[in-house]
Amino acid sequence: MAANLITLSLFIFTPAFCLAGTRPGEIPIAPDLLKRQWDAVWISCPDRDRTSYGVFHFRKKFNLAGRPDKFIIHVSADNRYKLYINGQEVGDGPARGDLWHWRFETVDIAGHLVPGENLLASVVWNFGEHVPFAQMTCQTAFLVQGDSELETVVNTDSSWKVAENRAYSPIPVTQAGMGDFTVVGPADRVDGKKYPWGWQRSAFDDSSWLPAVHVSPATPRGIRWMGSHWHLVPRMIPPMEKKLQPSPVLRRASGIKAGENVFRQENKLVVPENSKVSLLLDQTHLTTAYPEITVSGGRDARISLTYAEALVDDQGNKAHRDRIDGMHVFGYADEFTADGGKNRLFTTLWFRTFRYIQLDVRTAGQPITIESFHSRFVGYPFKQKASFTSGDPALERIWEVGWRTARLCAGETYFDCPYYEQLNYVGDTRIQALISLYVSGDDRLMRKTIAQFDNSRLPNGLTQSRYPSYMTQVIPPYSLFWIAMVHDYWMHRDDPGFVRSFMPGVRSVIGWFENHLTPNGLLGNMPWWNFVDWAVEYDSGVCPGADDGETSVISLQFVYALRYAEELAEKFGKPGEAEYYSSLAEGVSAAVRKHCWSEKRGLFAETPEKRKFSQHANIMAILVDLIGEDQQQRLFEKILSEKDLIQCTFYYRFYLMRALKKVGLGHSYLDLLGPWYEMLETGLTTFAETPEPTRSDCHAWSASPLYEFLATICGIEPGAPGFRQVRIAPHPGRLKRIGAEFPHPDGKIDCSLEKLGDEGIFGEITLPDGLYGEFIWHGRKIDLRPGKQQINLKE
């Protein structure tokens, strides 16, 4: 994950789209622009291979009689751009999508304009053959379209000037070099002596630059005459949050003496000429950020930044994440060569993921001064609006680390992991979306994700497993969890039109699985990668029988999705369709009971041969009511007690907890948090992909306790579709007191509860205006109404 690109530039950094009223959705787009071909055209650099790696600068000077109240422009590029007005960065993008849904950003730059001459400039890059898996692309191109007649002065055409930045060359980041699947794009090698310093400023001499060339018309998606590879659609999400964070601390140095806080106290570090210096820097927690290093002098000095989530020993193994003795950095690295100028700021085109950075400096005949070194956090702008209190410091730490994990795995899409892949997988994202919905109340990234997976559907009916991705991958079970994700959104947001639009996709997914039922009525002999979980006993995550034979696990996942589809079809006026889904679910359920139930073990087997048994199959059996409710608690107890079962890893423990709650054992949730306590004990500052040894130290499916703290311990869940009612059924377990703030679409839910002995509970619950619901405790119910109310149920 995490590509390594470093770009040299000197600028005043301001947050993207930082002006008042410029959040996506708040700036109206001229209606005709979404119905016709634009006046602007896609432009590029002449005489260059537009599919190869390259970094390009575009400039356009224009004059204004006065400073306008608004100056709205629509911007896009392939692969990506950063936009500057009069030397200040004002935006970047486009938000990741595909060619059929190519995003453009809408920005009001009026606050940065001046009477007289102004300069609009952009850096655009194409990673070419090194493009990240998550980056869809056609060719290098740039686009600016004014919203009205006033702004047409900056429309992209041949009046724009362009030059290639020859300072850049790629450093491939490959699986072979990293020793694991890493698909985040190249690192950058940048030669400061070739860099066009000040290119984004009006005074820069661009007389040698070339007129841009016309590549293609600019056309919104859906108009009659396209004529373009990029089908333009507005951005669906807000700009990313960018904020300066404290400089890292120095943990180890060679070749020079320096204190721990060398970069935290605004001290300068001078590296003498003809020296070799290595500094091991520790951010103290994992982060996603743009590193920024400012240097003066030191012509021909070579600087490299190597990024790592954790240090490793000589065998490549991680230890306690704070340990540095006997450990070293291993990861991808950016490199640049200084030109000798003063206050040169080097930063990256794309962000990096790191806790540790090794800064290596090799000087030539001049000393180099490191004026400052810090980083700028970047991520989706989720705001924590929920809170959870219990008086248990360990749970507070899990909350802190879990939220950091969730934030680092969310950008323009959700990420599985920010270091190795930055890919948006359905299985991961279903859990991530619930976490972000519960903690922030922000549903925009969830909406975008559901829509993108619908956009990814293949001719065979399945969604792709990860999207956007230029490399197609299919995990059939993930299409089933996409249906679950559509249902999740329907339960939590009152947006029926949006949900209804995905019903054709739901039908197509179900149709594919129905066509892969065996004569026994089970799923099996399925193509593609039938990933279920990273359980050690599974073959690359694939359960027995999926590829060759028959599988109970995926058959029951199919039933799980069918039950959701049945409910959606019924609610959206398709009773015949709902009845069909119900019949199909009953048929598959009966087949699993007949062929996979082991009377001897009292468990469902993985396959009809009944040689292997797993937690996974039996969890799904509970979730789809494959056995009577009176038998489910006993089955769940066997899931936990019989240690020869194939065990769930962090991902599938989300479904383990769903079963726990369903069988009425939610009060035992805290007893199952052992793996999270263990991660904290190893010094992890985010939650890992799998139990040790883990590849990724940051995987948002492992942040599921945040959802559980609110939905299970505090028991806050929708009581009706659209969250039009609330159901609060707490499971405090051993905790004496619990409290929560929860961001409901209608306002804040406040909950403060204290146990009275083993069976009683009292406290206060406050609901926002218009929200009704019920409180459930040990089988007793209390109606809830808007406003504050007392809860007092004695033993």
Image (cartoon, helix red, strand yellow):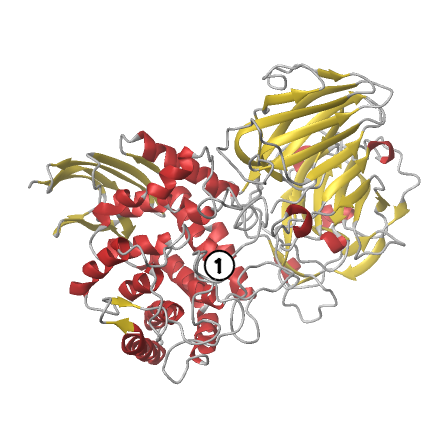
The percent position of residue 11, horizontal first and vertical second, equals 73, 30
Camera-side residue: 500 or 471? 471
Name the residue located 68 percent from the left edge and 63 percent from the top edge.
36
Q: Is residue 320 above or below residue 499?
A: above
- x then y, percent, for residue 659: 28, 57
Along the line of sight, which residue is nearer the eye, 109 or 309?
Answer: 309
Residue 662 can be seen, yes or no: yes
For this orientation, the residue located farthest to the bottom is: 519
Q: Is residue 477 left or right of residue 270?
A: left
The image quadrant where one finds the C terminus is top left
| Residue 723 in sight from this viewpoint | no
Disc 1 is placed on an element classified as helix
Residue 572 rendering spot, x and y as whole percentages: 36, 71
Is 144 placed above or below 337 here?
below
Residue 252 placed where, x, y %? Answer: 61, 22
- Image quarter of residue 613: bottom left
- Within 10 angstroms of label 1, few (less than 14), some, or many (20 or more) residues? many
| Figure quadrant of residue 308 | top right
Residue at left 89%, top 38%?
Answer: 206
Q: Is residue 51 above or below residue 333?
A: below
Q: How many marks?
A: 1
Identity, as a three-letter code, of the amino acid under mark 1: Val
Which quarter of the figure has residue 274?
top right
Q: Is 370 left, or right, of 337 in this rendering?
A: left
- The outermost residue toward the right is 208
Left or right position of 368 against 36: right
- For label 1, the residue is 426
Residue nearer the viewer, 65 or 657: 657
Q: Nearer the viewer, residue 150 or 282?
A: 282
